[in-house]
Amino acid sequence: MIAFVEYCFQVPANRIGHGQFSAAQLKAIQEIITLVVFCLFSVFYLREELRWNVLLGFGFIVLASFFIFQNR
């Protein structure tokens, strides 16, 4: 069920965004959406705390997307 919700956001976004974004940029957006859904699911459904090392790792992925979206 979680994957279905994520899929509903990603497929239309990839089809609409392909003309504006590169494949690498779309993949970065997809990964960030996946991380947000995962965090919400693990906190609210699994009742797990997000530890500092997990948040730091996810933060690095978001930081990587910053570099992917830089125009050269």
Image (cartoon, rainbow, N blue to C red):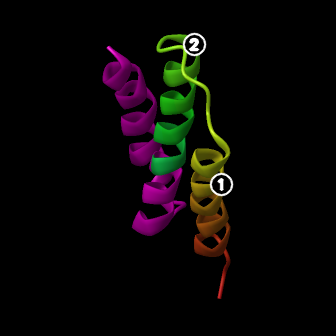
Magenta stretch, main secondary structure, is helix
Give the total of numbered labels: 2
The amino acid sitting under disc 2 is: Phe
Characterize the local packing of mark 1: few (<14), some (14-19) or many (20 or more) Cα atoms within 10 angstroms: few
**Residue 31: percent from the left, percent from the top?**
46, 49
Q: Which residues are magenta?
A: 1-30
**Residue 20: percent from the left, percent from the top?**
54, 60
**Front one among 21 and 52:** 52
Q: Which mark is residue 41?
A: none
Can residue 63 be seen here? The reply is yes
Give the mark, 2 or 1, whose residue is nearer the N terminus.
2
Q: Choose top left, top right, bottom left or bottom right for residue 64.
A: bottom right
Q: Secondary structure at mark 2?
A: helix
Q: Circle 2 is placed at which residue position?
A: 44
**Front one among 61 and 52:** 52
**Residue 67: percent from the left, percent from the top?**
64, 74
Quadrant where the image shows the N terminus: top left
Q: Choose top left, top right, bottom left or bottom right for residue 56.
A: bottom right
Can residue 22 be seen here? The reply is no
- Tag 2 and tag 1, C-beta contact below 8 Å: no
The amino acid sitting under disc 1 is: Leu
**Front one among 44 and 53:** 53
Q: Circle 1 is placed at which residue position?
A: 56
Does 46 appear above or below 63? above
